Amino acid sequence: MTKKHIHWPEDFTERIKKQYPDSFDLFINALSHDVKTSVRINPYKFNLPVSSESVPWCNKGYFLEERPSFALDPLWHAGAYYVQESSSMFLEQVFRQVKTEQPKLVLDLCAAPGGKSTHLLNLMNKDDLLISNEVIHTRASILRENLTKWGQSNVIISNSDGKSFGKAGSLFDVILIDAPCSGEGLFRRNPKAADEWSLKNAKLCTERQRRILSDSLPCLKENGYLIYSTCTFNPAEDEENISWLHKKGGYSSIRVPLIPSWNIEEIYYNGCWCYRFLPYKTKGEGFFISLLQKEENTGSVRFPKKSKIELQTPSPFPKEWLLNAESKKIYQEKNQIKFIPSLWEKEIFYLSEKVNFIKTGTVIGNDIHKKIIPDPEFAFSANINTEAFPSQTLSRDDALNYLGHREIHPYLSGIGWQLMLYNKISIGFIKDIGKRYNNYYPVKWRLRLQNYTTDKLWYETK
């Protein structure tokens, strides 16, 4: 691995020296080397054999020998895998400790850009529902893109603060708070973050994290689970925050089983079990996580007998477009025909009056002058019946040209809407009008690279 010559803040190194006196040199040396790139595949889309080294605590996670240009892989654009730091994939082991008899309502409070939300969607049961939230508006758009491409329909995307959720009442079975932090665990990936680090900023992070916890946790049910994580080594932002919450009462700590070869640091601090990834012990970045269960009874939410939102009866559309339609609540909002999971209808519309939803359900199509046309984002849904549409399989070069809104050479027959496939995975629609076609890949997601070479992809056989 390449060694970087980075000047670490003196206050940071002094604290690390006190925190890890016997391994300080190993710690700092590790921070000066690149970390291995890792990916997590989408089992609903990725259907190719993988020979890469597995991430031991994640069933679908893999380490790569080198970092490729992911933008030149149509499968990355299709949501077939997610580039995610390997340490944070330990969420899988933590979520396995969540025990509920009924379908779960899950909140990812600080979700952008979407790594943990896409992971949760693969860990949850098909009847569970995820509310994926991002408070910063500019970051919410990339969250929406990543979750739309991932393709699961049991997710709602919102853009609200923790206090808005807290006021909604005790609705959630699980809350994940990947709290904004001082970012020490990402210094080697982003050395500029080290330049912005200070004791003052770290203290402000601790205060903000406690405020987020206090504001949002009223929406957690009795016996519900809090997963708290950061990407810092700072005890004040990590185990001391967990201890602070535990001491307030109403929460018990849950231990997560470990395998010794994983080399994850297990911390027992003031009655709380916590887990930290250290750069000289694992191949991942710095990461902290802990699991608490709420014991306090905060009552239950009473849903209104009738929602304030009146659902519009959908215009007739080709039902064969949609898989598993029987489990969906299909309705129309303005000109959009969309669906949500029927099981969660009352919770979704109750929450829509409390927080700002920016994507409610999956859009199937649009009623344009009494003609139903498929929505461009529907091409990415795991609920699309690909056999209901004519399709064409693109080469890698043509797929990249399609994603960049450049010229491709499809077979034109004038048969209308067609799916563009790459490695049997849908990457979008065209409309074939005979002598030419219209490209319906969303312009806002367009691939903007102009000059490039298509090297071998990470999953291709050598």
Image: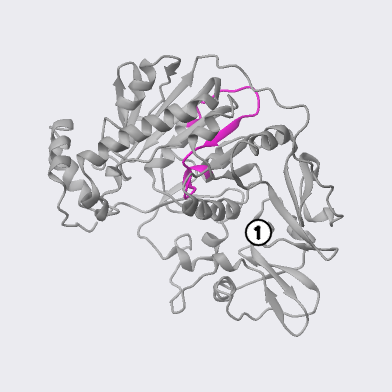
Which residue is at 76% across, 54% downward? 334
> Would residue 177 be found to the left or right of residue 158 on screen?
left
Which residue is at 32% across, 32% downward? 207
Which quadrant does the N terminus fall into? Answer: bottom left
The answer to whether any part of residue 49 appears in the image is no
Q: Is residue 326 magenta?
A: no
Judged from the image, the secondary structure of the residue bearing numbered disc 1 is: helix
The answer to whether any part of residue 161 appears in the image is yes
Residue 11 percent location from the top left of the image: 14, 40
The front one of 408 and 66 is: 408
Q: Type of residue at label 1?
A: Glu
> Would residue 174 be found to the left or right of residue 28 on screen?
right
Which quadrant does the C terminus fall into? Answer: bottom left
Residue 373 percent location from the top left of the image: 78, 64
> Would residue 306 be found to the left or right of residue 438 on screen?
right
Would you name the residue on which mark 1 appears?
Answer: 377
> Would residue 194 be found to the left or right of residue 381 on screen?
left
- Quadrant assignment, res 248: top left
- Quadrant assignment, res 256: top left
Residue 312 percent location from the top left of the image: 81, 47
Residue 19 percent location from the top left of the image: 18, 31
The front one of 350 and 92 is: 350
Which residue is most to the front?
308
Establish if 448 lies above or below 8. below
Q: Which residues are magenta?
A: 95-117
Q: Is residue 115 magenta?
A: yes
> Mainly helix, strand or loop, the magenta region?
loop
Which residue is at 31% across, 45% downward? 283
